[in-house]
Amino acid sequence: MMLRDATSADLPAMLVLYRHLSPGDPVLEADDARPDYERLIGWEMAHLLVADVAGEVVASCLLLIVPNLTRGGRPFAIVENVVTHEDHRRRGFATLLLHHARDRAQAVNCYKLMLATGRTDEAVLRFYEQAGFTRGGKTFFEMRWI
């Protein structure tokens, strides 16, 4: 297993993987997704991290490193879209990715790493806690347009 940044060639695998994150979302075709995907993987603040097993992308998360003018100018990091392919769950891939994201954030002197989830299943919440995140530290608010 290898942890790495996603490449242009990973787009089809990422679209399959994201079906396991939000199965009810409309299907996005590769030709339609390619411009945004290329912009995402080329953006210096974004790191689309993947777990690759024998050439197959089995899990992923998006790490954003955000410049900041507080905390002595130290950036902060956000993790989004944590997903493991249904056929590869409970093998530790997502935990390894989250630890990799943490290490990448620490390497650029981020003062915190944040993750929000809309999942309410206690097992999912315990998974994030076991990966090193704490709940209850801050109150999270959001606005949605969908």
Image (cartoon, grey):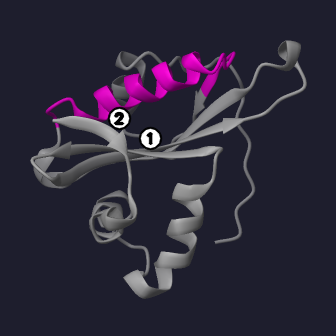
Picture coordinates of residue 63, whole percent (x, y): 53, 40
Magenta-highlighted residues:
90-113
* Residue found farthest to the right: 69
Residue 95, picture quadrant: top left
Query: Disc 1 marks which residue?
Result: 120
Quarter containing the N terminus: top left
Q: Judge whether residue 120 is colored magenta.
A: no
Residue at image coords 71%, 70%? 145
Nearer to the camera, 131 or 146: 131
| Mark 2 lies on residue | 124
- For badge 2, the amino acid type reads Val
User: In the image, is residue 44 above or below residue 145?
Assistant: above
Could you tell me if the residues under marks 2 and 1 are in contact, i.e. CB atoms within 8 Å?
yes
The answer to whether one can see residue 71 in this image is yes
Q: Quadrant of the C terminus?
A: bottom right
Q: Distance between the residues labelled 2 and 1?
A: 7 Å
Query: Could you tell me which secondary element the residue under label 2 belongs to?
Result: helix
Circle 2 Cα neighbour tier, 10 Å, few/some/many (<14 / 14–19 / ≥20): few
